[in-house]
Image: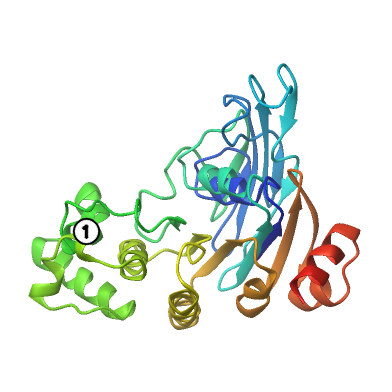
Amino acid sequence: MGIIGEFGSGKTSIALAMMGLLKKAATVDGQVNCHCISKQFGCSKSCLDGTRADLGVSPEAHCTDRNGLKGKTIKVCDNCDLTIRSGEVVALIGESGSGKTTLAGILAGVLTADEGEVMFEGEKIKGNKATSRKNGIQIVFQDPFTATNEHLSIAQVIKEPLDILKLGTKEEKLDKVRQALQDVQLPSDDEFIARKCHCLSGGQKQRVALARSLVMEPKPLIADEISSMLDPSTQANVLRLLKGLQNAKGFAMLYITHDLALARKIADRVYIMYNGRIIEHGSVVDVFDSPKESYTNKLVNNSL
C-alpha cells in the first residue's frame, strides 16, 4: 500500500494518524482507518485538520511567521480517507511538506489531532495504544541517524520496546533480537550486538531501526521515506529487503514516499496527496497508467 504526493501534501500526516500519533479514523488488520484534525501547531510544523480514510486525517497549520501568511489557516491534511488491508502495500505519495509525516505521526500516536479517530482491528484507538503492543502498528522513520541512540548497543536499541512493555524473559528478548537481526540481514553474534550504534553506517542503522519494529511483530508497518537519506545502492538494498520481509511475514505496509518509481515497484495501491488532500487513489496500474487528475499526470510524466 502506498501514498503519493508533493511536498506538504499530507502523506506523512496520514501515516502518523494510522500509528495513533494523529487523530481521525484508521483501521488495520486487515485495515487501518483514520480521520484526524489538529490545530495545535504553527506553520513551521506539520499539523492535522480533517483527513479521513478508512483512514482519514485533516491537519491545519495556523501560521504565525512565514512568508506573510500570519493569521491564515492552512489545511495540511484535509479530509483524507485511506484504508490499508491485511497483507497489502499501500504507497502514500506527496512532496516534502505535504503532510504525510504528520499523518504518520497521528497513526503512530506521536501526534494528536483535534478531531477524528483511528481504527485498528475494528476498535477505536487513542494515542499510542496501537503501537505500544505486540502485533500492533509500528513505524520506521526517515532519518536513520536520529532513529537510534548512538550511545546504546545494538541489542539495547532493538529490545527497547520489549523492555518497555515487559515482554518476555531476558533470554527470550535476546532470541528475538538475534532473529530480527537475521531478518534484516545483519550479523547476530555476541560481538556485533554489543557494538554501539555510532559504529554503524547509515544503511546499517536503518536496518537496526527496522529490526526494532520487527521484534514487535507488527500487523501493519509504516515506512516513512526510509530510504531517502541513503546512497542509491544502499537504498536499493533496503527496499529489496523491506519488500522481501513484507512478503515473507505478511504484514500490511504503508510506504510513504515522493518517488513514483519506487512506489510503482513496491506498492499494490497508491494514494496521491496534493496540498493536504488525497486527490486520487487506486491500483498502481490504474493511477500510474491512466491518471485522472492533472497533478497526478504531471507527477507521472516527471518520473519517466
As drawn, 93 above or below 64: below
Position of residue 168 measured from the top left corner of the image (x, y, whole percent): 17, 60
**Which quadrant: the C terminus?**
bottom right
Left or right, 49 with reference to 244: right
- Tell me the kind of residue under disc 1: His
Position of residue 147 measured from the top left corner of the image (x, y, whole percent): 35, 53
Q: Secondary structure at mark 1?
A: helix
Instruction: Work out whether residue 197 or residue 25 is closer to the camera in this orientation and state it.
Output: 197
Which residue occupies 68% across, 33% down? 49
As drawn, 210 above or below 103: below
Which residue occupies 70% across, 42% down? 51
As drawn, 231 above or below 9: below
**Which quadrant: the N terminus?**
bottom right
Which residue occupies 34% across, 58% down? 134
- Its colouring scheme is rainbow
Q: Residue furthest top?
A: 71
Q: Residue beneath label 1, please?
A: 198
Which residue occupies 11% across, 61% down? 169
User: Badge 1: few (under 14), some or many (20 or more) residues near its Cα, within 10 Å?
Assistant: some
Number of numbered discs present?
A: 1
Q: Is residue 66 visible?
A: yes
Left or right, 44 with reference to 193: right
Position of residue 210 measured from the top left corner of the image (x, y, whole percent): 37, 65
